[in-house]
Image (tube, rainbow, N blue to C red):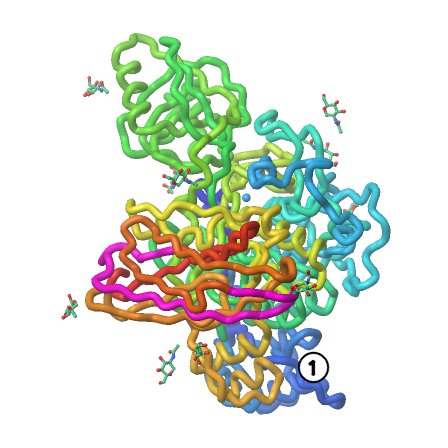
Amino acid sequence: MEKLQATSFSLLSCVLLLFLSSVSAITDDPQDKQVYVVYMGSLPSRPDYSPMSNHISIIQEITGESLIEGRLVRSYKRSFNGFAARLTESERERVAEMEGVVSVFPNINYELQTTASWDFMGLKEGKSTKRNLAVESDTIVGVFDGGISPESESFSDKGFGPPPKKWKGVCSGGANFTCNNKLIGARDYTKEGTRDSVGHGTHTASIAAGNAVENTSFFGVGYGTVRGGVPAARIAAYKICGFAGCSSASMMAAFDDAIADGVDIITISVGYYFTRDIDQDSTAIGAFHAMVNGILTMQGGGNFGPKPTTVTSVAPWIFTVAASTTNREFATKVVLGSGKTLVGRSVNGFDLKEKPLVYENVFKCREKSLMKDKIVACNYGNDSEVAASGYIFTQEKDYASVSPYPLSYLSPHDFDSLISYVNSTKSPQATILKSEAIFHQRAPKVTSFSSRGPNFIVADILKPDITAPGIEILAAYSPLASTSNTNKDTRRVNYSVLSGTSMSCPHVAGVAAYVKTFHPEWSPSMIKSAIMTTAWPMNATTTGFTSTEFAYGAGHVDPVSALNPGLVYKTEKADLIAFLCGLNYTLKTVKLISGEAVTCTEKTLPRNLNYPSLSAKLSESNGSFTVTFNRTVTNVGIPNSTYKSKVVLNHESKLKVTVSPSALSFKTVNEKQSFVVTVSGNDLDPKLPSSAHLIWYDGTHNVRSPIVIYAQDQM
Ligand SMILES: *[C@@H]1O[C@H](CO)[C@@H](O)[C@H](O)[C@H]1NC(C)=O
Ligand SMILES: *[C@@H]1O[C@H](CO)[C@@H](O)[C@H](O)[C@H]1NC(C)=O
Ligand SMILES: *[C@@H]1O[C@H](CO)[C@@H](O)[C@H](O)[C@H]1NC(C)=O
Ligand SMILES: *[C@@H]1O[C@H](CO)[C@@H](O)[C@H](O)[C@H]1NC(C)=O
Ligand SMILES: *[C@@H]1O[C@H](CO)[C@@H](O)[C@H](O)[C@H]1NC(C)=O
Ligand SMILES: *[C@@H]1O[C@H](CO)[C@@H](O)[C@H](O)[C@H]1NC(C)=O
Ligand SMILES: *[C@@H]1O[C@H](CO)[C@@H](O)[C@H](O)[C@H]1NC(C)=O
Ligand SMILES: *[C@@H]1O[C@H](CO)[C@@H](O)[C@H](O)[C@H]1NC(C)=O
Ligand SMILES: *[C@@H]1O[C@H](CO)[C@@H](O)[C@H](O)[C@H]1NC(C)=O
Ligand SMILES: *[C@@H]1O[C@H](CO)[C@@H](O)[C@H](O)[C@H]1NC(C)=O
């Protein structure tokens, strides 16, 4: 199962998991057949090749049946080659052996991973932000998610002209689903129609490219303008998640279509529970073909942190996004009868009058008629009990979420003062106020739920790549969805607050689209490099393995600086082919994926891929080591410029880093220069990765890359 990546999660993870796991059965068949995705690489360029007919022949051959009704689930034939089919175990084995097949993997399900955030990042509203509106209007953001709410004001086409000429998609959203000149395309792979009944897809789409909508709020909370990164861009919605989850077969189909439809950017707030090998990962496969076609794919890193190796988006051609705080957070005050005010966390849209307060000295609040018309304070709560008027729980939370009833989470310290008050009073009373936005100075900070590196599949590629706002984001929502995603909550809203790498991912998609409007000719790797090397530095702390580059990659996205990076690290298709060869995929596999007659004579060590971050895993932390990284930068700044290298060690790092040559001169734009970074040291900190930054500096630009060295035995 793959799943949506929102942390409406705190309250919801159970709900989502329940409804997802209950449907994993859908892919199973009464006759022991399961749906498998059969990936066959690039489309052959032979004019006589008919993918669909080839797929049918393959199924006929392995099943020995000429009538294959119900076997072929989907054919991928527009942007790459492959199909999804119902197969028995022995048929799966046979098809895997066949000529032309790269990989066969089960049709597992994904999980979904939720806008003052743009101001926080320095992309202000109005004239102070430079925009290239004509190009922005020709930019199409493809959103792979749980559908979209087409009537939302965030997707109104007031002021939009007809879709860009390059658009080759369709609007097939199902009954009563109408596209317009803003929401120009809709496809559905769930048989439910593209309309969003969960809220997640509407939210992510509006973060990336929603219109600016004034005077919006969640029941008055977070009042202001909700907007996307590129409000003038167009949106195409690809519904890959439905009640049955988000299947790999749908993920592949959405890539097959979106690439051919002509989208510019793809954003996917959907991830697996478990990390998979690149050739078994439908997002990695789809994103590879997208990249070859000039389309950059963003994906949320997952909400499985803070443990190491929980990042589930691992391929270097995907832009993997962590989630962090902004300077705005939502607080919910609890006012005690004594007048004392305690500041707790939650997104509370209710206005509750003063009520009698009771404290339940149990681990969980229990449903009791006694609780009626009272505020109940207990250590831990549970959605399905809504017996009381309001609840106060205690838990240190680093993000707030929408609750189906008046609720505030207090810190253990404040909870103790509440208990003392209850103890000391005959008839204790309390009020839970509506949430308010408060300013939070110590931002950004990566949230605990955000998935951490290291990369479990390609150890020397640092993941996540970057972090972006991912908590308490107010954006568009589906009025069909329960406001807190619980059965008990019958409130319906057009705007809501969600948290997750689901929400940080479309922020970076919006930034990538924004950068592309100024540099339409830049390849996906150039856009990604520009965003990574201009990111705000974050602090590697000694408080733990996971408060390091393994939490935030290159740092925090900075949209305006990303327009002018000076130098970029480019990776072209040939580099990625050499990288795949270096990962020891067979020649046959690499040939099929690339669609070219490759020989794998050139094998790139993963750490020598021309990536904007530098990372290497050592076999052990003790003893001495020396590793080198080869890199090439391309000048996208000004002619006749000279960059000097500078290495900044993170605190307590004992690395020795040399850069050769230590200065690079460029006569012209687009000129390339190569260099080698040598990192040596001994007896690394056994608990923490050792890190530093490489900076190329020309007096104007700081082209910054993290360098991260870690060892097997630190894991
Ligand atoms: C479509 O809308 C019409 C009118 O609002 C309604 O009667 C009909 O049931 C809707 N159909 C579906 C499939 O939702
Ligand atoms: C938003 O509110 C302001 C202040 O009340 C008002 O001037 C403005 O017209 C409103 N905008 C919209 C679109 O309603
Ligand atoms: C929540 O409470 C309900 C009813 O008391 C119970 O059935 C359920 O198991 C509880 N859920 C959790 C996650 O504790
Ligand atoms: C509240 O009272 C109970 C029983 O009288 C006592 O055990 C507990 O320590 C008191 N708690 C606080 C925080 O004062
Ligand atoms: C949500 O938006 C729809 C369409 O714009 C509008 O008809 C409806 O009144 C809105 N609902 C709320 C709760 O604002
Ligand atoms: C990182 O640490 C430095 C020095 O302690 C501090 O000035 C800076 O504000 C911190 N940055 C962040 C993002 O916390
Ligand atoms: C690929 O195989 C070579 C030779 O067996 C080995 O040295 C190298 O470590 C392998 N690379 C990876 C990424 O596993
Ligand atoms: C490194 O540590 C391991 C395990 O603690 C030990 O077996 C090995 O001998 C050490 N190597 C060196 C070079 O100290
Ligand atoms: C790395 O760069 C050095 C110096 O330019 C060169 O000798 C070496 O062949 C390069 N290695 C790879 C794997 O490209
Ligand atoms: C770069 O410098 C060279 C030599 O000094 C000069 O001829 C050339 O005009 C300069 N180019 C630009 C664009 O300034």
In this rendering, does residue 32 appear at all?
yes
> Which quarter is ligand 10 in?
bottom right
Residue placed most toward the observer, 132 or 631: 631
x, y percentage for residue 209? 68, 47
The reply, left or right, for residue 659 in relation to residue 58 is: left
Q: Find residue 122 and report its image quarter.
A: top right
Q: Which residue is mark 1?
A: 52
Asked if residue 194 is among those painted magenta in the image, a careful observer would answer no
Q: Residue at x 51, y 78 (%)?
A: 104
Task: Please state which amino acid type lies under the numbered disc 1.
Answer: Met
Residue beneath the point at 59% across and 51% down = 562
Highlighted range, magenta: 664-692
Q: Is mark 1 within 8 Å of ligand 1?
A: no
Relative side of 120 to 150, left or right: left
**Taking 46 as reference, is 405 above or below it?**
above
From the top left corner, tell me how far across and down residue 180 is, in percent.
Answer: 81, 50
Q: Quadrant of the C terminus?
A: bottom left
Residue 368 location, x and y as percent?
37, 27
Q: Is residue 173 visible?
A: no
Label 1: few (<14), some (14–19) or many (≥20) C-alpha neighbours in 10 Å: some
Q: Quadrant of residue 129?
A: top right
Residue 683 belongs to magenta span: yes
Q: Which x, y percent locates residue 51?
A: 69, 83
Of residues 563 and 163, the one nearer the viewer is: 563
Reply above or below: 183 against 165. above
Q: SS class of the residue under badge 1?
A: helix
- Determine whether 81 is above or below 354 in the image: below
Q: Nearer the viewer, residue 371 or 274?
A: 274
